[in-house]
Image (spheres, grey):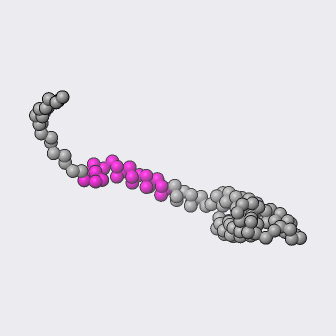
Amino acid sequence: MLYTFCIVLILIASVLLVLAVLVQNPKSGMAANFGVSNQVIGVRQTADFLEKFTWGMAITILVLSLLATLAMDSHIASANDSSASNDAKALIEMSASEQPAMPQAEIPAAEEAAPAEEAPAQK
């Protein structure tokens, strides 16, 4: 229950973080040349709020992720571990079987050929 609640809050915080980043005015770079000048009254305070909001959302996502990991049901984690161990056992059994995974072509025995006579080098 708490795990699902944390996941929902993480998704909401992620969307808010994306929106906060998109709303912010670029500080420098090519995109700053196309933006509106920050000389309007109150814009600096808005930029400070958006920056604090962005950091707050990032920290919120971090804390909620850690809380969700701690709140994860132990049977979910043990189910994941048991399925991984079952997969590992199946792979070991498949590799231990005597049949190759791919049919192998037989290589014909090479007949011993007499060495070819070398022609003398011409000058």
Looking at the rendering, in which quadrant would you find the N terminus?
bottom right
Residue 106 picture location, percent across and down: 19, 48
Viewer can see residue 79: yes
Vertical side of 75 occupied by 43: above or below: below
Q: Residue at x 34, y 52 (%)?
A: 94
| The one of 46 and 65 positioned closer to us in this rendering | 46
Q: Residue at x 68, y 69 (%)?
A: 15
Residue 70 picture location, percent across and down: 66, 57
Vertical side of 45 occupied by 96: above or below: above
Q: Residue at x 71, y 68 (%)?
A: 22
Q: Which residues are magenta?
A: 82-103
| The one of 113 and 34 positioned closer to us in this rendering | 34
Vertical side of 46 occupied by 99: above or below: above
Q: Is residue 96 magenta?
A: yes
Say whether residue 77 is left or right of residue 86.
right
Residue 80 picture location, percent across and down: 52, 58
Task: Name the magenta segment's main secondary structure.
Answer: helix
